[in-house]
Image: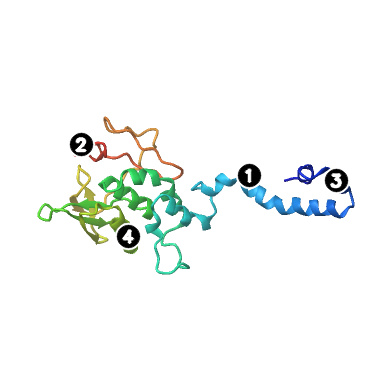
Amino acid sequence: MRRAAIERLLPAAYQRAAGPGSVLGALLDVMEALHAPDEAVLADVDALFGPYRTPDGFVAYLTRWVAMDHVVAAPRADAPLPLPVGRLRDLVAHGALLARWRGTPYGMRTALELATGVTGFVLDEPPERPFHLVVRVPPAAADRLALVTRIVEAEKPAAVTVEVVATPADTRLDPAPDGTGPAAAGPPEPVPPDPTPDAAEPAAGVATVRAVGRAHVPAPLPHESPEEPS
């Protein structure tokens, strides 16, 4: 608040006494200086809550707002983040999307890909073990099994048991057409670049989920839609 604005709030007798060089005038100048930092924050307060604008130290706090704080869970408050702050920003930006798809294969794969920056996670449901899920972790994310396990435990349905398995470095597991299990294993093959979001053609009847910010989030498969009747 400017000095003149503060002065107008005072009684008339005080306003007359707050002339240049007066003690009250100097006090009003100090009040203006004290208000300036807070007013600068309030003028841009929306930046505190924007995933890609907030300071690095505030990103972990925002994960609580979108129920993703299990990603940064650590035994000590001063422990470093288990993932780069940029990936944490991606998770916060897509928090509403992840909440909508929580408990589905698409939701779990999306959370894992955003947190690790690695694609190729395979969710396998063995027919001989009902209500059991095997998450096969690609070699590029094998060094982040603790992070992957925390995300899987939080994203899976409550009645399902889970097993996290690291895929050997010389093996590649491709998702089956339904996106739930491995279709074939073999040596790595060249992968063509992904089309841009504008050039990609979504599957029939499925709306493309556009990314918020920097991360690219693929569209869900038709059979994974949460609106489908069970």
In primary-sequence order, the first of circles 2 and 4 is 4
Mark 3 → mark 4, Cα distance in angstroms: 65 Å
Q: CA distance from mark 1 to mark 4?
A: 38 Å
**Which residue is label 3 attached to?**
13
- Farthest residue toward the left? 128
Decide if residue 100 is in sight here. Answer: yes
- Identify residue type, mark 1: Ala
User: What kind of residue is marked 2?
Assistant: Pro
As measured in the structure, the alpha-carbon distance from the residue carrying label 3 to the one carrying label 1 is 32 Å
Whether residue 29 sits left or right of residue 61 in the image: it is right
Label 2 to label 3: alpha-carbon separation? 74 Å
- Which residue is located at x 33 percent, y 43 percent? 100
The answer to which image quadrant residue 152 occupies is bottom left
Residue on which disc 2 sits: 229
Which numbered disc flags the more N-terminal residue, 1 or 2? 1
What residue lies at 29% left-to-right and 59% top-to-bottom? 139
Q: The C terminus is located in which quarter?
A: top left
The kind of residue tagged 4 is Arg
Q: Nearer the viewer, residue 162 or 31?
A: 31
Q: Nearer the viewer, mark 3 or mark 1?
A: 3
